Image (tube, grey):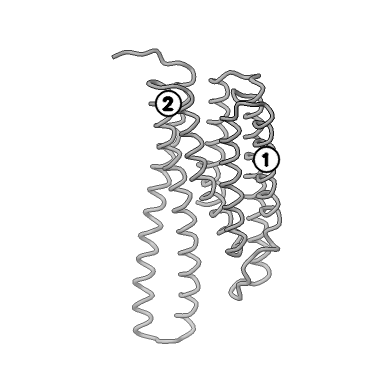
Amino acid sequence: MTFDLKHEELWFLIGTCLMLISLIYFSILLYRIYLNLKKNNKNDKNDKNDEINNEKHNQNKQIEEIEKRNFYKKLLATIVVFLAFISYLGMLLVSIYASHNEVTLIRYFEWMITTPLLLIDLALLAMLVKQRIYTLILLDVLMIGLGLAAVYSLSIGMKSLFFILSTLCMFGIFYILLTPENNMIDNPNINEKQKKDLIQKSKNANIYTITIWTIYPIIWLIGLHGFQYINIPIETLCYLILDFLAKPMFAFLFVF
């Protein structure tokens, strides 16, 4: 069976390859980190048997907690890239054998899962309190859900309403991300210098994420479900670039 590869399908194919390469790269790094963590845990057990309750053991315990936290951040980032790979593979197959409506559903379903995971990664990076993490996830689910409702709304009024509500949820997320120092866990193991470095790194990651996420609704507005200033292949390319920057590139710059 033969078929003509349209521009949209070409971008899905490129997206699938980019996500797969990124997934392999991050999986290798994650496996190496896991082996080191396992080795350190084994050494810590030996130290504990030799010198119970000594200062060295307590320091090792603190380092172990930090390493575990970093490992979970990297694991989440790798899972996000894996889900993005599955999504682009699914959109490639669906774009060949089905309609663009199914592509939209796959894209929103993936966003419904990956965007909360990205926010949890940002929350772990900033050491946010649990209440703020729950608020971020709630706002995110509402943002994606209302965006999907806007896609399938038949009237201009309802489409505009859902889009505005979705955008307001996004701004709520941005507000929390821009003020991480007000929502951090009070950790006695972190001194003031470490706290300032943590806040600065967190702010850089948050500003990066906010910049990219802000472009998504703009593409939505000028794309198929908005004013239709750009065609489907160009819209697909724009989403591909944003997805790559928001997921693999974010993990490369701020997590690994």
26 relative to 173 in the view: left or right: left
- Residue type at tag 1: Thr
Q: Is residue 64 above or below residue 249?
A: below
43 relative to 205 in the view: left or right: left
Q: Is residue 115 above or below residue 220?
A: below
Residue 108 lies, in percent from the top left, at: 51, 37
Say which element carries label 2: helix
Say which element carries label 1: helix
Q: Which label was assigned to residue 197?
A: none
Q: Is residue 137 above or below residue 111?
A: below
Q: CA distance from mark 2 to mark 1?
A: 30 Å
Judging by the rendered image, the residue that carries numbered circle 2 is 13
Quadrant of image for the N terminus: top left
Q: Nearer the viewer, residue 4 or 23?
A: 4
93 relative to 182 in the view: left or right: left
Q: Is residue 118 above or below residue 222?
A: below
Q: Disc 2 vs disc 1: which is toward the camera? A: 1
Which tag, 2 or 1, sits closer to the chain's start?
2
83 relative to 243 in the view: left or right: left
Label 2, residues with CA under 10 Å away: few <14, some 14-19, many ≥20? some
| Residue pictured at 41% horizontal, 26% vertical | 92
Q: Quadrant of residue 194?
A: bottom right
| Residue pictured at 48% horizontal, 23% vertical | 100
| Residue pictured at 43% horizontal, 35% vertical | 87
Judging by the rendered image, the residue that carries numbered circle 1 is 167
Q: Nearer the viewer, residue 155 or 123?
A: 155
Residue 243 lies, in percent from the top left, at: 54, 36
- Residue type at tag 2: Leu
Contact (Cβ within 8 Å) of mark 2 with mark 1:
no
Q: How many marks?
A: 2
Residue 174 lies, in percent from the top left, at: 68, 49
